[in-house]
Image (cartoon, rainbow, N blue to C red):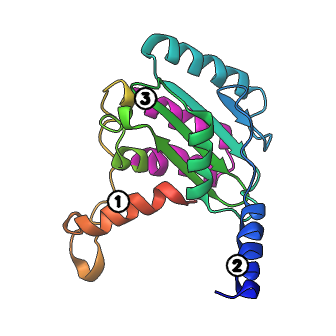
Amino acid sequence: MTRAALLVLLVALAAAGAQAREVPVLRARVTDEAGVLGGRAADLERKLADYERDTGHQLAVLVLRSLEGDALESFSMRVADKWRLGDSRRDDGLLVIVAIDDRAARIEVGYGLEGAVPDAIAGRVMREQMTPRFASGDYAGGIEAGLDALMRAAKGEALGPPPRSAPGRRGRAGVPRRVFLIEDFQQITSQVLSFW
């Protein structure tokens, strides 16, 4: 590789790294940089502290106005790596990230909680608890409902049946929706990343 090509590559890599959004310092279980939680942030902080004291599982929430062009997946992994939630031996932390202007959210689950909170459960929590509230502008309510469901799931409690679809709701070509298991899986995993 020529020196000029190497220089161009290094400049491009430096520019890409410079565009990455900075990970905030973990100072509390609830970090609301977007200012959408208001007085409910303190209530959520107490609820998460009580839950951590009772179970040992550490949950945290990061609410941002924007990812500033950063990819949600890479940003959430950088936050999880820097914040190191949960017990280091059990890896039982859980992180909820919401980017308001980007209309995106993600739930990162430590390996120690993946049995109780697999991607399918995280997707259900997003779809059933968080997304409907976010769509109506109730970010605090969506985050609180999502955390309540995630805490129940992490304790091994069932979420209950999903809400029923409208009677007679059909999928493609008139075939009942339950036949499309692969499609449903794709919807679950995609909604973990971006929604409403």
Which residue is found at the position 58% from the left and 57% from the top? 74
In percent of width and height, residue 158 lies at 30, 32
Q: CA distance from mark 1 to mark 3?
A: 37 Å
Residue segment shown in magenta: 124-152
Q: Is residue 166 visible?
A: yes
Image quadrant where residue 103 sits:
bottom right
Kindly report which numbered mark, 1 or 3, lies closer to the viewer in this rendering. 3
Q: CA distance from mark 2 to mark 3?
A: 39 Å
Which residue is found at the position 65% from the left and 22% from the top? 45
In percent of width and height, residue 166 lies at 35, 59
Helix, strand, or loop for circle 3? loop
To which residue does mark 2 refer? Answer: 9
Which residue is found at the position 49% from the left and 29% from the top? 148
- Categorize mark 1 by other alpha carbons within 10 Å: few (<14), some (14-19), many (20+): few
To which residue does mark 3 refer? Answer: 92
Q: Earlier in the sequence, mark 2 or mark 3?
A: 2
- Categorize mark 2 by other alpha carbons within 10 Å: few (<14), some (14-19), many (20+): few
Q: CA distance from mark 1 to mark 2?
A: 54 Å
Q: Is residue 163 visible?
A: no
To which residue does mark 1 refer? Answer: 166
- Asked whether, in this view, residue 104 is left or right of residue 18, the answer is left
Q: In front here: 30 or 79?
A: 79
